[in-house]
Image (cartoon, rainbow, N blue to C red):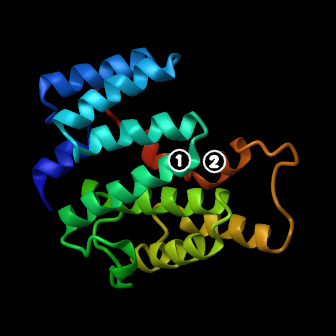
Amino acid sequence: MDADFDAAVLGLALPPMVEAALAEAGAQRGDPVRAMAALMRAQSLAPEHPAVLIAFYRHHFYGHRLMMARDVARRALRVGARALGLPGVWREVPEAPLAGARHDAATRFYLFVLKGYAYLSLRLDDAVEARDALALLRALDPDDCVGAALLEAVRQRSLAGLGGDEDGDDTVYVQATGAAAWAQLPVAA
């Protein structure tokens, strides 16, 4: 795998101006407009850096802008696929196990992004996308290193009409599925 990509996933190898913009976005998270301005500056400087994508995902996800978070996940899937030598469109990725699901940063990044994408598709009531993304995730990660089985169980409960939290609160799903775990990947502050 690409050592530069591995460092990038861990929030390393950031140009100083990008690091500063991401730090500003984090400091401004209570002010979505200012946070977005800082994120846009970071994106203009490093549009495909994993740390920038993770920061954008977090901004949208925790701001409950799930459609926008899913759009970021799509971009991150293309970046991760490139690092792994996979097709850029996730639907074209062969259903074969990926080596390194436990330890390789690029592989884990891709798997967690795909899991986040599946989760967001569930939340956005895009049943076909969720089903297909989870099927691919289970094929790529047959040892279930990223916990797709639990997300599939949530999907099955939903199909059976058992749903989740009566208040519509996302917290139960996020904690149970770990679907936001890729958003927990470190980003230089």
Q: Position of residue 51 (x, y in %)?
A: 29, 39
Structural crowding at the residue carrying mark 1, measured as other residues with C-alpha within 10 Å and reported as few (<14), some (14–19) or many (≥20): many
Circle 2 residue: 174
Q: Secondary structure at mark 1?
A: loop
Query: Left or right of 97: which side holds 130?
Result: right
- Is 48 or 96 nearer to us in this picture? 48
Query: Left or right of 130: which side holds 4?
Result: left
Query: Left or right of 57: which side holds 169?
Result: right
Residue sticking out furthest to the bottom? 95
- Is 3 or 83 nearer to us in this picture? 83
- Do tag 1 and tag 2 residues touch (Cβ < 8 Å)? yes
Q: Secondary structure at mark 2?
A: helix
Q: Earlier in the sequence, mark 1 or mark 2?
A: 2
**The N terminus is located in which quarter?**
bottom left
Q: Position of residue 144 (x, y in %)?
A: 49, 69
- Quadrant in which residue 128 is drawn: bottom right
Please, is residue 53 above or below residue 70 in the view? above
Circle 1 residue: 180
The amino acid sitting under disc 2 is Val
Find the distance from the CA under tag 1 to the CA under tag 2: 6 Å
Please, is residue 188 above or below residue 162 in the view? above
Counting labels gives 2
Q: Position of residue 54 (x, y in %)?
A: 37, 42
Q: Residue at the spot x=34%, y=81% of the render?
A: 92
Visible residue check, residue 102:
no
Structural crowding at the residue carrying mark 2, measured as other residues with C-alpha within 10 Å and reported as few (<14), some (14–19) or many (≥20): some
Q: Position of residue 146 (x, y in %)?
A: 47, 60
Q: Residue at the spot x=54%, y=64% of the render?
A: 118
Please, is residue 90 above or below residue 179 in the view? below
Q: Residue at the spot x=76%, y=42% of the render?
A: 169
